[in-house]
């Protein structure tokens, strides 16, 4: 694609500065940031409520089952909470859960090193 030399801009400054945001634009941006912050907090609260309920169910029901079932349910619950954290966009929760899940899965493989 050839552009004629007379139509090529000489410098990026020749594009000029865009229009300044109006007070309404600034207000809308501030409200949008507040809304996003509120949505993030609600997602985080929703995750911790679900994790708390899972822990409460564990405390009530796990003493009645054997060790193999406890291990299986523990792995299943970690996988469930990991997928829930990723779905809700809580990366600061998903990363440690993923490390914990991988540690449990790789524990029986005979690796000599641990993180």
Image (spheres, rainbow, N blue to C red):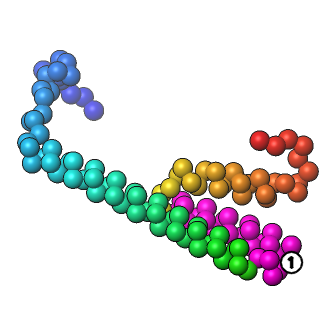
Residue extent of the magenta highlight? 62-87
Identify whether 44 is placed above or below 12.
below
Quadrant for the N terminus in the image: top left
Left or right of 47? Residue 10 is left
User: Residue 14 appears in which quarter of the rendering?
Assistant: top left
Q: Position of residue 5 (x, y in %)?
A: 17, 20
Residue 7 left/right relative to 63: left
Residue at 79% across, 57% down: 104
Q: Residue at x 59, y 73 (%)?
A: 53
Q: Residue at x 80, y 77 (%)?
A: 63
Percent position of residue 80, x then y: 63, 68
- The residue at which mark 1 appears reads as 66
Q: Nearer the viewer, residue 3 or 84?
A: 84
- Name the secondary structure under disc 1: loop
Q: Is residue 26 above or below residue 46?
A: above
Q: Residue 52 in the image: x percent, y percent?
A: 58, 68
Kindly give the residue lying farthest to the top in the view shown. 10
Q: Is residue 71 rendered magenta in the image?
A: yes
Magenta stretch containing residue 113, yes or no? Answer: no
- On the picture, is 55 further left or further right than 85? right
Q: Residue at x 9, y 48 (%)?
A: 24
């Amino acid at each position: 694609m050839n552009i004629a030399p007379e139509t090529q801009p000489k410098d990026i400054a020749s594009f000029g500065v865009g229009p300044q945001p109006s007070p309404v634009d600034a207000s809308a941006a501030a409200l949008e940031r507040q809304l996003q912050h509120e949505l993030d907090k609600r997602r985080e609260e929703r995750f911790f409520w679900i994790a708390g309920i899972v822990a409460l169910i564990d405390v009530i029901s796990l003493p009645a089952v054997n060790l193999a079932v406890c291990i299986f349910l523990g792995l299943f619950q970690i996988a469930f909470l990991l997928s829930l954290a990723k779905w809700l966009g809580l990366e600061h929760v998903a990363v440690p859960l993923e490390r914990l899940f991988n540690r449990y899965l790789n524990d029986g493989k005979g690796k000599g090193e641990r993180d």
